[in-house]
Amino acid sequence: MTKKNIIQRVSLTAAIAISASCAFAQDIHFTQFNATPLILNPAFTGGFDGPIRASAIYRDQWRSALGSASYRTFAVSVDAPIVRDLTGDDYLAGGVQLYNDVAGDGNLSNFSGLLSVAYHKFLGLDGNKDLSVGLQGGYTSKTIDLSKLYFGSQFQSGTFTGPISSSFDGSPVRYFTVNAGIGYSHRFSDRFGLSLGVAGNNLNQPKESLSKEKNSDVGLGRRLSGQIGAIWYTGERFSVRPAVLYQAQSSTTEIIAGSEFHYIVAGDPEIKALATGLFLGGWYRNNDAAMVSAGIEHRGLRVGVAYDYNTSKYNTATNGKGGFEICLRFIGLNPINAARNLVYPCSRF
């Protein structure tokens, strides 16, 4: 490793450590947030046209500056309608979301498992309006490898003493959290659909702290979010898919805005569920990064990649190199609607 790289890595690590009071107890985020609908809003559970949906996403952030200590996040989810025709076309859906985040030299690991249910109520005689409410419960376990870290208390008069302050013993932190949300989608025509949602996460504000000192527990801040997305077919093969995600947690806010541009390259455009399409997207996260996404969709399978160009105050240390993501999502085909020119906007999330 060159002297320049060492200086960059130390600078970024120091900057993150200094801002830890702001960054601590924050939830994870993804550029391709449409791959993690259950993390965004439990009301999106089962919000798609098909028998099952499964997704997986991997994110690697700041590897250029931190090397093997980069921030690495992996998430998988499965959700599906579980009880249909409750009242008319209304249905109850269930889902499972798992994710694990590993960060820094100390391998700070955050594993979370979420179970969610959502009730979908169709409004109006045409069945083109869907109102959903969702509830979610989760379990989290956080661990850290103290053997890979050094603390000021280990140095006395310039001499390394070894023992770590008794306030840290490396034991895991475990807690439960409660999330809730509401969503609404409207298919105005075969060419245009809109969906939106509002959610609250960590409503019980569970305590979490790796320090065992009295009164050191930090309550995980409530995360409030709002989402809006649309699908607009301007022609038989071309569609524009704008979306905005807003999140606020503790003193931190995040806004992601942008759009995907989707083009059907093969197959009958009247049978969109079976067609093959390519997409390219441009996004911006406020005070953090400019992002690009691209990929392919074929018979319910979506493969996407994304890259972040860092525009934040860490830009000097990272040389603009932010995060890389790759995601897979599969939505099973609905045998009834597979042959219809159907726009179901909730699948955007």
Image (cartoon, rainbow, N blue to C red):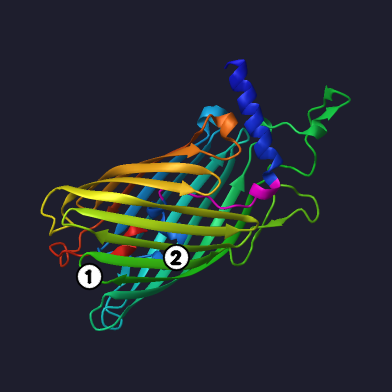
Badge 1 element: loop
Mark 2 burial class by Cα count in 10 Å: few <14, some 14-19, many 20+: many
List x then y, in percent, for residue 120.
35, 74
- Give me the residue at 12% from left, 63% from top: 339
The part of the chain drawn in magenta is 21-32
Mark 1 or 2, nearer chain start: 2
Q: Is residue 26 magenta?
A: yes
Q: Quadrant of the N terminus?
A: top right
List x then y, in percent, for residue 113.
49, 55
Say which mark, if any, is on residue 189.
1
For this orientation, the residue located farthest to the front is 234
Q: Is residue 54 above or below residue 69?
A: below
- Give me the residue at 71% from left, 40% from top: 18
Mark 2 lies on residue: 42
Mark 1 burial class by Cα count in 10 Å: few <14, some 14-19, many 20+: few
- Give me the residue at 31% from left, 72% from top: 186
Number of dots carrying numbers:
2
Q: Nearer the viewer, mark 1 or mark 2?
A: 1
Q: Is residue 55 above or below residue 315?
A: below
List x then y, in percent, for residue 57.
40, 45
Query: What main secondary structure does the magenta stretch of the protein show?
Result: loop
Badge 2 element: helix
Residue 31 visible in the shown view? no
